[in-house]
Amino acid sequence: MDRETEGVLDVVGPRLRALRRERGHTLADLAVRTGVSESTLSRLESGQRRATLELLLPLARTYDVPLDDLVGAPRTGDPRIHLKPIRRSGMTFVPLSRRPGGVQAFKMIIPAQSTLLEPTPQTHDGFEWLYVLNGHLRLVLGERDLTLPPGEAAEFDTSLPHWLGSADGGVVELLILFGSHGMRAHVRADAEYSSHRKGRR
């Protein structure tokens, strides 16, 4: 096996672990979804078990990602980036970065709603930075209930209960940078900062 191939296989485990944690799955959950035993998945993530097509195919189907994304195989020939939207809880996420782990970039689209949704805050590890492109975003963060118009940005610890939705029932488009625990964006903006900036104009 050549060094390039060995290098690709060596990073499969960390990629799989980062992707599982990003999606919020436990090893037990993933074992049920894929039919691969929990111990095999654990050894695969730790590098004690070599990745095989038999193991990677059910993982790619479960995560709904191309097989190349799991192994980080370099693309050849076609220089275009093929973005595959992910639909979750009625919202659309367009991944703008390809590398599992580290900071992940998404474009998020919240569809128009005839009835405003009741917030259902969730928590998970990490930090999130967002920037509203179009529409009016409703951000519920702990005890705070904020409306962010186009051009507003926010950053927060996702271990706080949070929820994103449309403030007025219209479509909302935003950019999101999500980092695992301890990884934060360098630019910070919140409602107080924005008000301060507006007051200086």
Image: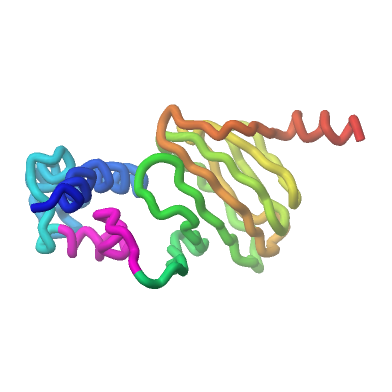
51 displayed left or right of 21: left
Q: Quadrant of residue 180?
A: top left
Magenta: main secondary structure:
helix
Q: Position of residue 168 (x, y in %)?
A: 72, 58
Q: Position of residue 23 (x, y in %)?
A: 35, 49
85 displayed left or right of 168: left
Front-most of 86 and 101?
A: 101
Q: Which residue is found at the position 40% from the left and 72% from the top?
A: 78
Q: Position of residue 14 (x, y in %)?
A: 25, 41
Q: Please state, as top left, top right, bottom left or bottom right, where the C terminus lies in the image.
A: top right
Per the image, is 88 magenta?
no
Per the image, is 65 magenta?
yes
Q: Which residue is found at the position 24% from the left and 54% from the top?
A: 71
85 displayed left or right of 41: right
| Residue 27 at least partly seen | no
Outermost residue, right direction? 201
Q: Which residue is found at the position 37% from the left and 50% from the top?
A: 99
Q: Position of residue 58 (x, y in %)?
A: 18, 63
Q: Quadrant of residue 66?
A: bottom left
Q: Which residue is found at the position 59% from the left and 56% from the top?
A: 117
183 displayed left or right of 37: right
| Residue 177 at least partly seen | yes
Coloring scheme used: rainbow
Outermost residue, front direction? 2
Total number of numbered labels? 0
109 w.r.t. 123: above or below: below
Magenta residues, start to end: 56-76
